[in-house]
Amino acid sequence: MIRAVDFVIEDATTLFYDFDAFGTVIDAHPYIEQIAHANRLDREILTGPEPQILYFTGKREIFSVKTVLGQISASHNPSRSIGGPNGVRLQNTISVRIAFSEPLLFEEAMTRTATLSNYLGMLVGRPQNILKLAVRLALENDAADFLRVYWSMPPRRDASHGEERPHPADVLMDAVNEPDAFSTVLASWLHVHSERHEARGRFFGCFANQHYYAVDRLVAAANMFDILPPSAVPRDVAMSQEQKNARDEARKLSRALPQTAERDAVLGALGRMGKSSLKHKIRHRAKWVIEKADRQFPEIETVCNEAVNCRNFYVHGTEPVFDYEANGAAKTFFTDTLEWVFAASELIEAGWNIGAWLGRGSSMSVSSPVTT
């Protein structure tokens, strides 16, 4: 049984950009005598005119929050050499930990690890390669035994889909300077994950493609809204009494016809009247973005509607609004918009301050559903 998991993601120093945790002293002269003799060695330590001092502030924990997955935290793990004629080295690794409230089977521990890694990759702007992974065993004698895990087929980003390294300015949330806000959004996002994991799975499948766009990705980006649970989208759409009367009369006339595929199709369409369509669901999710950033995205509903029209052409063969094949950039734009609305609406719903992020500007280091 597994008590905790520790792992290192590829872009940890970008996501947790704690620039001031390590540094060098510009003028070391006032401090070098005290530091050079702090170890109280039984020999004389000679200092010179060009001293250098490297330091770690000592604050290891970056953030920590209790979630449905367990206690999640990130921390610095500096390592150092003892010095000598070859010099001295101070290196750091930022690791993420999930400490489970109850010991788990290995499979469930890895599922939770993958869920958190996906979320962190979304904040950075690209899927994450897990560089190191270790588990802490739940032993009867309460010993802290850690085992290194060698994952034979770990989640891995396809390098052929684009390798632009993200910039810290583009990360969606600042865990270093705003750990409370970061923790709140993470806990809230995970709180509803169990009921939204199917739709989110579609999103992260699209997200993994990064700069590779195909029709199937556009279709998947639209369909993920259709499999959101009722708590995330409206179930019904308001209908006037006239519309209800027309529906009931059309249903009565259709049922009187001989049973054919066409008759059944009409009855099926009538039965869906008053129920949320794909466009209704996407517009509902887009409202989360519009309410917080309407100035930046004034026509986002129009783009979403056209994205569904494009999807319907490839799924149902409906009449195209324009020549989609001759305008491949439009399909890419539609795909990015749908993925952006899906990811951003969930983060805003969880408490993300999109206005503060937009106000910081962007280095345009990545082009992903959330940073586009």
Image (cartoon, rainbow, N blue to C red):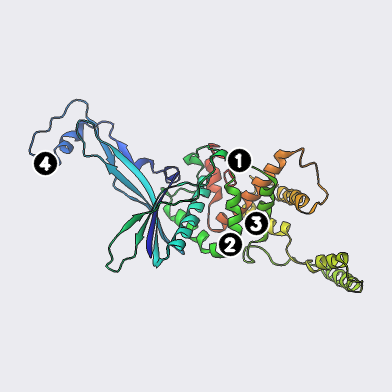
Camera-side mark, 2 or 4? 2
Extreme residue toward the front, this view:
152
Task: Give yes or no for contact between labels 2 and 4 (Cβ–Cβ under 8 Å).
Answer: no
Distance between the Cα atoms at labels 2 and 1? 25 Å
Vertical side of 246 occupied by 117: above or below: above
Count of all numbered marks drawn on residues in the image: 4
Classify 10 Å Cα crowding around label 1: few (below 14), some (14-19), many (20 and above).
some
Which mark, by number, is residue 211? 1
Vertical side of 254 occupied by 95: above or below: above
Q: Which residue is mark 4?
A: 40
Q: Is residue 249 left or right of residue 238?
A: right
Which mark, by number, is residue 224? 3
Label whose residue precedes the other's in the sequence (2 or 3)? 2
Looking at the picture, which amino acid does disc 3 mark? Met
Label whose residue precedes the other's in the sequence (2 or 1)? 2
Classify 10 Å Cα crowding around label 3: few (below 14), some (14-19), many (20 and above).
many
Asked whether the viewer can see residue 297, the reply is: no
Looking at the picture, which amino acid does disc 2 mark? Arg
